[in-house]
Image: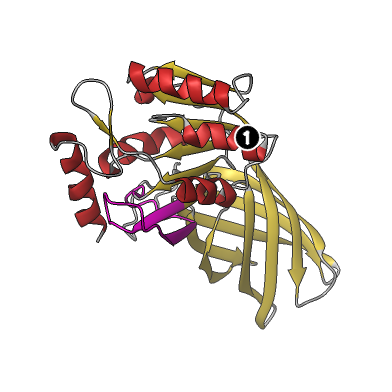
Amino acid sequence: MRTARWMTMAALVLLPPATGAQEGKGDVVYVPTPQVAVDEMLKMAKVSPNDFVIDLGSGDGRIVITAAKKFGARGLGVDLDTYLLKQARSNAKREGVADRVEFIEQNLFETDLSRATVITTYLLPEMNERLRPRILALKPGTRVVAHDYDMGEWQPDEEKTLIVPEKKVGDPGKSYVFFWVVPATIAGRWESLIYTGGRGVIYEFDFDQSFQRVSGDLRVDGKDARLPIFNVRGERVSFEVDAPVGSGLVKHRFQGVVKQDRIEGTVTIAGQKPLKWTAQLKKRGEMRLSAVETRLSVTQ
């Protein structure tokens, strides 16, 4: 299905403008995101006045303008088409948000993304995948929303299908919205000292990470347990495991926030009162930019 949408979209640059497409500079055809999809993208990202939205391939500016007008955000639109940039600036002025948004002529692959708390795109898959390493290098917690086309092996945290009768391009009548949160990298070996049963016990975690998905192993007092697969959402970590304690298995629930080489939070053991939990990074690993299920070799 997504391959078919990609082929249809790619063909648009070679065909005369159709309903739902607008002619931009030269022979390039600009396909605007339907307003209902724009609204849903910004809602999924929970855009607020505290956000700075960067729209890559901003066209007539509708995403950044909507972010400013409806959600109070500030924003930047990036495009190479001078005609569309002029139109976007005019639209921003008409909607009363010209002081909150900016539109610049620039190659989106050269754009500084570091200011963004939210990034939006309506780009072909090959362009999204080229952007992917740069996006994953941004501050954990940065939100990313794409219309119709995903990020390849980086599976979305959320996705929605919208019925859009007026949409005539891509997959006619439907829009697909994909949402991600840039994950912190926790791949590697971590160690905690947890006081339970009147003594301190060392917990060793060996995390294997592919994008936001994490698996791995836990060792407690020389006894091993396999960790369940869980997701890192921005800087937040949460997982449960039946850990080997004494002669049996005891349920542990870990919750924490990644702070560079430390994870700070709580652990709840056997449903008792939460205890302070701090994990210290001992050997750093690397996030695998592939969904292939292979074990990570922790950097020595």
Q: Is residue 165 magenta?
A: yes
Which image quarter is the N terminus in? bottom left
Magenta highlight: main SS? loop
Give coordinates of residue 155: x percent, y percent: 40, 55
Q: Is residue 191 above or below residue 243?
A: above
Identified at 28% across, 39% down, the residue is: 21
Q: Is residue 9 above or below residue 171?
A: above
Q: Evaluate whether residue 139 shows in this view.
A: no
Residue 132 in which image quadrant: top left
Q: Which residue reaches farthest bottom?
A: 248
**Amino acid type at mark 1:** Lys
Identified at 33% across, 49% down, the residue is: 149
> Considering the numbered disc 1 on the image, is that residue within a helix, a strand or a loop?
helix
Which image quarter is the C terminus in? top left
Where does the magenta region start and end? 149-178
Return the residue at label 1.
69
Identified at 45% across, 60% down, the residue is: 160
Give coordinates of residue 206: x percent, y percent: 52, 56
Q: Is residue 57 above or below residue 144?
A: above
The colour scheme is: secondary structure
User: Is residue 49 found left or right of 17 in the rendered image?
Assistant: right
Give coordinates of residue 40: x percent, y percent: 52, 51
Q: Is residue 249 above or below residue 263?
A: below
* Camera-side residue of 119 and 300: 119
